[in-house]
Amino acid sequence: MNCQNPGKICEGLWYLGRPESGVYMLEGRDGSVIISGGMSYLVPDLLHQFDEFGLKEDRIQGIIILHAHFDHIGIVPFFRIRNPGLKIYASARAWQILSEPKNIDTINQFSGRLTERMNVHVPYPVHQLDWPVGLSGEVISEGDVIDLGNREIQIFETPGHSSCSISAYVPQIRALFPSDGGGIPYKGTILASANSNFTLYLESLKKMEMLQIDYFCADHFGYICGDEAKSYISSSIDLAIKERARLEDIYRRSLDIDLAAREMASSFIKANPDYFLTFEIYEGVCRQMMRHIAKTMGQ
């Protein structure tokens, strides 16, 4: 079952934000952690939901960035300003990406475009929401554990969606937080989100398939629970294999990365005009995917 409504998932775990962009609050005996960073325009929603659900902001010890794309890091600057001691966790590659001024400019531009697209008014100044130069934090990698006392967050490196992707897993409640690396639940199917490297994306899915999952906690379009969660990664693998074959067919027709990306993006947005990404941003995603497809096909 796919649930996109903010609220309690199970004891100590909450889904917050909006359907197209969500984050998770995991509570433990020694404090709480926000898993994933969502869009910057979520800030007013989160503050309201903290109050609505009785969540204590002063118990939040850190935020885990699962990868460094603009729509997964947005709330970090605001909450770091409110609490300078807040720990921000990310992979070494993510911190490298987030240290480069060119990438920071792109992140802030895309964040602004998406806020306009979603027609959200955020009553805070830009300097509290944009990613700033110089923000840094804790490096986490494969095998690391964040201990909340009675619960632990295990970290896995799961590249493919991006070069910096990691996933988090909480064995005590069998909850997986793969960000986009596990496939995006959308309209009853699973979107293969192999943005940077389809080969590594499939390898990462097979790695996550070994976990016992009762809650599949996606960043876009909510979380999955029940029997569907248990089989979600296996289904994601099957659909990703089919999607890769489809993309290879698209590329083979023109042997042109830009034309293939435009065809891929146009057909998807035409069928899903309400998708949260703008056409330009989604076309960029498709171009990135097609570059890897072309490379693996020897073109």
Image (cartoon, helix red, strand yellow):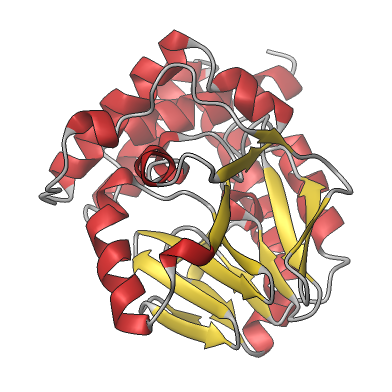
Image x and y of residue 251, in percent: 55, 27
The answer to whether any part of residue 275 appears in the image is: no
The answer to whether any part of residue 214 appears in the image is: yes
Between 99 and 216, the one nearer to me in the picture: 99
The vertical placement of 270 against 29, above or below, is above
Between 37 and 183, the one nearer to me in the picture: 37
Question: Left or right: 152 with respect to 191?
Answer: right
Between 257 and 104, the one nearer to me in the picture: 104
Between 1 and 241, the one nearer to me in the picture: 1
Question: Left or right: 64 with respect to 23?
Answer: right
Which quadrant holds residue 107?
top left
Image x and y of residue 76, in percent: 43, 42
Which quadrant holds residue 88?
top right
Q: Where, quadrant-wise, is the C terminus in this rendering?
A: top right
Residue at 64% across / 49% down in the picture?
181
The vertical placement of 62 against 232, above or below, is above
The vertical placement of 32 against 68, above or below, is below
Residue at 31% across / 38% down in the picture?
266
Question: Left or right: 2 with respect to 114?
Answer: right
Residue at 83% across / 56% down in the picture?
206
Residue at 62% across / 34% down in the picture?
162
Image x and y of residue 67, in percent: 59, 39
The vertical placement of 144 against 257, above or below, is below
Image mark count: 0
Image x and y of residue 97, in percent: 57, 20
